[in-house]
Amino acid sequence: MRILFISSSSGSRGGGELYLIYLGQELAKRGYAVGLWCSENPIMDELADSFSKFGQVLRSPYINTYNRKLRSFTHLFPKTNQECISQWRAFKPDILHVNKQNLEDGLDLLTWSNYLSIPSLATIHITQTQDKLGAVLGKWRDLIAKIALRKYRGILTAISENRGQELTSFISPTTSDLPKIVVINNGVNVPNKIESLAKRQESRLQLKLHPDELLIVAVGRMEAQKQPLLFLKWAIHLKCKIPSVRFLWVGDGRLTSLWDQWIIDNNAQEYIQRLGWQNDVTPYLAAADVFFHPAAFEGLPFALLEAMAWCLPCVITSTLLEELKFPQEVCFVASEKDNFKDLDTLINYQERNAVATAGYQFIKKQFSLEKMVDTYAALYGNIKLLS
């Protein structure tokens, strides 16, 4: 079977792009012919290069929604792009799989897929509305997205149960001719204990960590959504409790210079470090003792899922816990209203181990990569059979 992934081309280096790599690579291993269509904008080069190792890549002068001055308002007068549609046809796909970052991006891609007889589905990662996120003219942008999603003829997939509920509520399907919504949990590779231990020893040696040093890691873009400055507040609080602790943020972005200046102003260079973007973050997860994920909101963060899969006790915000609807026992929650006293629990090894084990079992049961790929393969087969 031939699957062509259609990327809305945000170039965010986030979970949506990891999702394409993880899913596409595993499908290729199972004998599927996979392709990726994306913008020729340089921000997509990294994803295109990674995908080209196992699948065909098609590039187009397509402009992502967030590189347009009018954002989704351009969809009020949608135009057909025969060049893009011809590229899709040329791949001879059995299934078109559109990958959208959020509700409003890539609406034109859905419209173009409606012109084809090829069966399609579209995955939406972030289901929070623009109005909820405080975006300019958010209500109007949400209305445009809602109309376009209702007109889509394919299947919509959400990446977790709560995202599926939000998507259903947003579209408000009350008649049978509206898009069908299917929930397929994101998935990550779950390493075995022998692999984890070997990589941990190697990585800690390379990072020159002493056996008694506690390493706390975060992975993500340095953007407002990810709240890297909150990570620094957590770090300062915990440093007073555990003198031997060290902190590492993996990733970069628009807040990098602000972060670097904060480090200098607070003389924190010796115990808080930052690395740029890394294609493989598993060495840092293997070396870590705790994982911080201070994001304000997410779709379903791959970084957090991977940290839990590496059996790390994870710390998140109360707002993120409420959004993800994870069981409370699988993560620590840091609350600013209590001056982050919740973090003091990390001092206790038994407490850390209990949360890490609960998180590991949770991921293994519900968010494994194998389970995700199995479910998509079954869905592709059903769609093809019914087309």
Image (cartoon, rainbow, N blue to C red):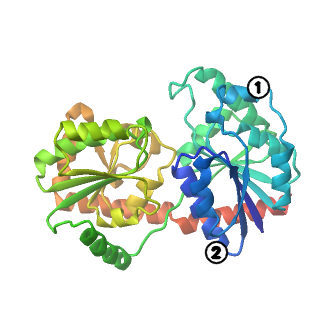
Q: Position of residue 327 (x, y in %)?
A: 39, 50
- The foreground one among 252 and 287 is 252
Please give the residue where the numbered disc 1 appears in the rendered image.
76
If you read the primary sequence from the N terminus, does the residue marked by circle 2 or circle 1 appear first?
2
Query: Is residue 104 in view from this perspective?
Result: no
Do the residues under discs 2 and 1 have CB atoms within 8 angstroms? no
How crowded pointer 1 is (Cα within 10 Å; few <14, some 14-19, many 20+) is rated as: few
Horizontal relation, residue 222 to residue 347: left or right: right
Place residue 93 in its image quadrant.
bottom right
Horizontal relation, residue 198 to residue 122: left or right: left
Check residue 29 in the rendering and tell me which mark sits there, or answer none: 2
Judged from the image, the secondary structure of the residue bearing numbered disc 1 is: helix
Where is 16 relative to 367, above or below?
Answer: above
- The foreground one among 274 and 292 is 274
Judged from the image, the secondary structure of the residue bearing numbered disc 2 is: helix
Q: Residue at x 50, y 60 (%)?
A: 367
Place residue 145 in its image quadrant.
top right
Query: Is residue 126 in view from this perspective?
Result: yes
